Image (cartoon, rainbow, N blue to C red):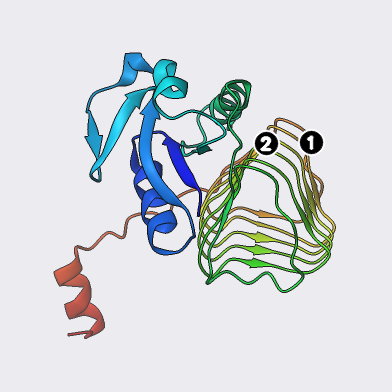
Amino acid sequence: MSKVVIFGAGKIADELFHYLTYDSPHEVVAFTVDAAFLTTKELWGKPVVPFEEVTRLYPPGEHEMFVAVGYQDLNRFRAKKCEEAKAKGYRLISYISSKASNFGKVEVGENTLVLENAVIQPCSRVGSNVFIWSGNHVGHHATLGDHIYLSGQCIIGGGAVVESFCYFGVNATIGHEVHVGEESFLGAGTLITKNVAPKSVYIEPETPKFRLDSASFLRLTKMK
C-alpha cells in the first residue's frame, strides 16, 4: 500500500478519492491545491494543504501523488501540475478500475485514470495523463497520446491515433484508422470518419426542443 496525496479539491478529486479508497491498494492521506485556491482545510476527512508546503508535510519518497483536475486549457493545466509535482520529487500513480477490461494488459502512463466498464483492447497504447471515464472503448492497435480526456461512452476505433492534448465529449466516436491531430476538441455526440487536422473543433447541434410540453405530448401519443 502506498500513501497518496491528491492534487485538487474539486469534483474530480472527489471521484478519485472514492476510487482509490474502495478499489485500490493506495491510501489517500491528504489533498493539496495552490495556496491561492485553498478554501477549505479538510475534504472527506483528510487535510487539504497548500501545494507550496506539501513536500514538508508529506515528503516525496514517503508519498506519491495523483493530479486530479479537469481538462482546462485542453488538459494543459493538468499537464503543468503533473510536471510541477514531479519537479518536487513525487512519483505520479495511475489508477485502473478493477471493473475495467484490459485483457491485453496494456500498460498505461503515469497519472492516467481508467474507470469502470472501460475497454482497452490488446495491442493498443495509452500515454500519460490520460483520463478514460466510464464506458469508453479503446480499440485494438489504437494509440492515445499524452494529456487526453475521454468523457463517458467514447469510441476510439481500431488502429486509430489520438495525438496529445485532445478532448472528447460524451459519446464522441472516431472510426477505424482515423488520425486525430493534437489539441483537437470533439464535442458530445460527434462522429469522425476522416482524419482530423490539429487544433480542429467538431460540435454537434443539440436536439431541438419539441413544440409541446410533456403533459401535452403524453396525451397526444397516448403514452400515459
> Where residue 126 sits in the image (x, y, percent)?
73, 51
Q: Is 221 on the left-hand or right-hand side of 170? A: left
Identify residue type, mark 2: Ser
> Where residue 82 sits in the image (x, y, percent)?
59, 29
When asked about the image quadrant of residue 172, the answer is: bottom right
Q: Nearer the viewer, residue 57 or 152?
A: 57
Identify residue type, mark 1: Ala
Which residue reaches farthest front?
62
Q: Nearer the viewer, residue 144 or 2?
A: 2
- Does 164 appear above or below 89? below
Q: Is 29 on the left-hand or right-hand side of 171? A: left
The numbered mark at residue 80 is none
Mark 2 in CB contact with mark 1 (< 8 angstroms)? yes
Q: Is 23 on the left-hand or right-hand side of 172? A: left
Residue 207 in view in this figure: no
> Where residue 164 sits in the image (x, y, percent)?
72, 37
When asked about the image quadrant of residue 136, the answer is: bottom right
Q: Secondary structure at mark 1?
A: loop
| Residue found 59% across the figure and 59% down from its top | 154
Q: Nearer the viewer, residue 72 or 57?
A: 57
| Residue found 51% across the figure and 58% down from its top | 152
Give neighbour class at mark 2: few <14, some 14-19, many 20+ (Cα, 10 Å). Answer: many
> Where residue 1 sits in the image (x, y, percent)?
50, 55
| Residue found 77% across the figure and 70% down from its top | 104
Q: Nearer the viewer, residue 189 or 167?
A: 167
Q: Secondary structure at mark 2?
A: loop
What residue does disc 2 label?
Answer: 184
- Does 32 appear above or below 117? above
- Does 94 appear above or below 72? below
Residue 47 in view in this figure: yes
What residue does disc 1 label?
Answer: 197
